Amino acid sequence: MRVAIIGVGLTKFGEQWETSFSNLFVEAGAKAIEDAGIDGGDIDAIFVGNMSGGRFIDQEHTSALIADHAGLNSVPSTRIEAACASGGLALRQGAMSIISGFHDIVVAGGVEKMTDILTERTTQTLATAADQEWEAFLGMTFPGLYAMIARRHMYEFGTTREQLALVSVKNHSNAKHNKYAQFQFEISVEDVLRSPMVADPLRLLDCSPITDGAACVILASEKKAKEFTDSPVYITGSGQASSTISLHDRERITVIDATVNAGKMAYKMAGKSPNDIDVAEVHDAFTIGEILAIEGLGFVDAGKGGKATEDGITKIGGKIPVNTSGGLKAKGHPVGATGVAQAVEVVLQLRGEAGKRQVDADAGLTHNVGGSGGTAVVHIFEKG
Amino acid sequence: MRVAIIGVGLTKFGEQWETSFSNLFVEAGAKAIEDAGIDGGDIDAIFVGNMSGGRFIDQEHTSALIADHAGLNSVPSTRIEAACASGGLALRQGAMSIISGFHDIVVAGGVEKMTDILTERTTQTLATAADQEWEAFLGMTFPGLYAMIARRHMYEFGTTREQLALVSVKNHSNAKHNKYAQFQFEISVEDVLRSPMVADPLRLLDCSPITDGAACVILASEKKAKEFTDSPVYITGSGQASSTISLHDRERITVIDATVNAGKMAYKMAGKSPNDIDVAEVHDAFTIGEILAIEGLGFVDAGKGGKATEDGITKIGGKIPVNTSGGLKAKGHPVGATGVAQAVEVVLQLRGEAGKRQVDADAGLTHNVGGSGGTAVVHIFEKG
């Protein structure tokens, strides 16, 4: 059995001072419901990807808050958390719930409200995705972790500082045409190299921003989907894997094993290989992250991600366009929402509704990472 | 298709100063694996019920932490959160994952380490299960919410202060024979009535304690289960419902609608009625909670829970023994673990392994509530 996506919805990503956590989710959900042509009464369950309501807005139990504020009681509502991979896992749990026969139509969404607390507390909260006892407590933050990976990748494979910058340049260029993106403007390699140092070699413009936002998709059983649309997009592969939560426990840090393993599971389930994928949204929380992703997912050989980026393979019009939405870097990264927002972009591409970002695609992929790779989740999508 | 439980494991519940969050889960998981007669390599996935790692131990992404510290990478590991109902939902997601065919054997567990922070911060963290903007921010805590329910129940139905106390007396009496319980001693009605006032009419001995602990079960497909045991217990019903997260938004506060609706779903799936249930573990975070539960689940008529308790119907040897484990009140309430610990007790009862707490049972039920009833989840279990 296949699971269909029959509706998608996004809020604007950015600093959303005028709205609340639950309003963000409800806005994205209402758009997805409208897009699907269903109404709230058709919803059997809600799955909420949310990293840290408890620390960002002093609110746990966010699944109940959302069901209530959406006016959808007594629908079952469940929060899924795996740091920045929370959204991807909400999508996976939503799909499982349909394949199991428990539900026919569900909302799988993600949300984060990150700007209601001081920036220093935001950084501390994001660091709770790392091992608290062995990494965060000692002062390690995510830019630092990814900086070590970048430095090692440069050392082992000759990846250059400019190649890292080109990931950011490409993703900003894509975001220019995405009205939901936090940063709808282009930047140059020089801009990246002149931006403030965060953790050597990563500079400010190598890092995804702090973002408020939400994303939702409506999932339906194949049978139900046909009642509402002639052209659903199907989820045909889903893979999830764990790896050590601490970077220092890995045999190698230039490969995220969880990405490789989740990718293999998803490809196997879909009966696809990397060559079959026409468009991908991958986890570029830092520029080095996109390079690790395209290598780990098999789009390019190990160590060749920097060169491939320089060669334009991942641009719109290239062999495998990556992060046509602008990615986490330029679209923004509301951590719990990101995995679902990636799915929204791939659905728009497969439907031919991506406007100036449109590529020619029959099959797409999303790749969502928690922490420095303790969790990864990969989904494959195909036209109906 | 039915989902089997082929192994169970618990840690001691209480103040666990000498161990860590992840060690607690790993201990319970290892016991469950040993009980099932499988080994770690047989595990396809982990589902972790955990309310607030982010605030209790400054650690989100607890699913990855646990997979890592359990030595089970690259197994998919997923955290589920719905406040005090987190464990029950982890069980439900684990069951869905098997019925969907994604997995054959999974660990569904729950864990909380609540004593590593100051008690006042614990109370604040528990209050994040309520609506932050409309309840917690204004100073409302859970004893206060349940006190209002208790007061209203007394007013509407004539429930007495002594009847509330008898819930606690019964559950302490049961916990005396449970070596995993936090409080293995009996108390009297007078003890309850003399204990310090927390929120009128609820006193200290009406309230469940702050607890560290973990619980795990091994779930398997029916086919896989037969490879490992001749006498599995089956999950035959699962129901989940949401209600308003805020108490003030409800038309009535003496019924938890989510309990009623989740119960109906579970009874329907199992083809059972309340009369078919021989033993139940229900959510007695406060004494009034057990009275609401036995009414909402249909074991007694609405408003009659206090009288039924006084009449001994819910005692071991009564018509429907409730909380033979000692319940949240006396066994302890590590919030993310509670829903799974309830399942452990019912499995032990159905297997005839409950020692001096043993009752005669073919079918059992668990009932787990998040917050003041924003989430409820009910499971029904039967002998194989």
Image (cartoon, coloured by chain):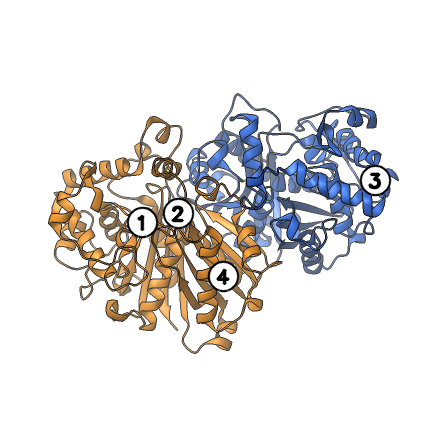
Chain colours: A blue, B orange
Q: Which of the two labelled residues, at mark 2 and mark 4, occupies the earlier sequence position? A: 4
State left or right for residue B310 relative to residue B232.
Answer: left
Any part of residue B143 in sight: yes
Q: Give the Cα separation between the discs numbered 2 and 1.
A: 9 Å
**Few, some or many C-alpha atoms within 10 Å of disc 1 (few <14, some 14-19, many ≥20)?**
many
Q: Chain of mark 3?
A: A
Mark 4 residue type: Val
State left or right for residue A216 relative to residue B315.
Answer: right
Q: Residue at x 33, y 64 (%)?
A: B346
Q: Position of residue B16 (x, y in %)?
A: 38, 52
Q: Say whether mark 1 and mark 4 are on the same chain.
A: yes
Any part of residue B271 in sight: no
Q: Chain of mark 4?
A: B
Mark 1 residue type: Val
Q: Which residue is mark 4?
A: B107
Q: Give the Cα separation between the discs numbered 3 and 1.
A: 56 Å
**Given contact means CB atoms under 8 Å apart, are the residues at marks 2 and 1 in contact?**
yes
Mark 2 residue type: Ala
Q: Which residue is mark 2?
A: B241
Q: Position of residue B8 (x, y in %)?
A: 41, 65
Q: Position of residue A170 (x, y in %)?
A: 79, 33
Total marks drawn? 4
Q: Say whether mark 3 and mark 2 are on the same chain.
A: no
Q: Say whether mark 3 and mark 4 are on the same chain.
A: no
Between A169 and B178, the one lying in front of the other is B178
**Which label was assigned to residue A14?**
none
Quarter of the image with the N terminus of chain A is bottom right
Q: Chain of mark 2?
A: B
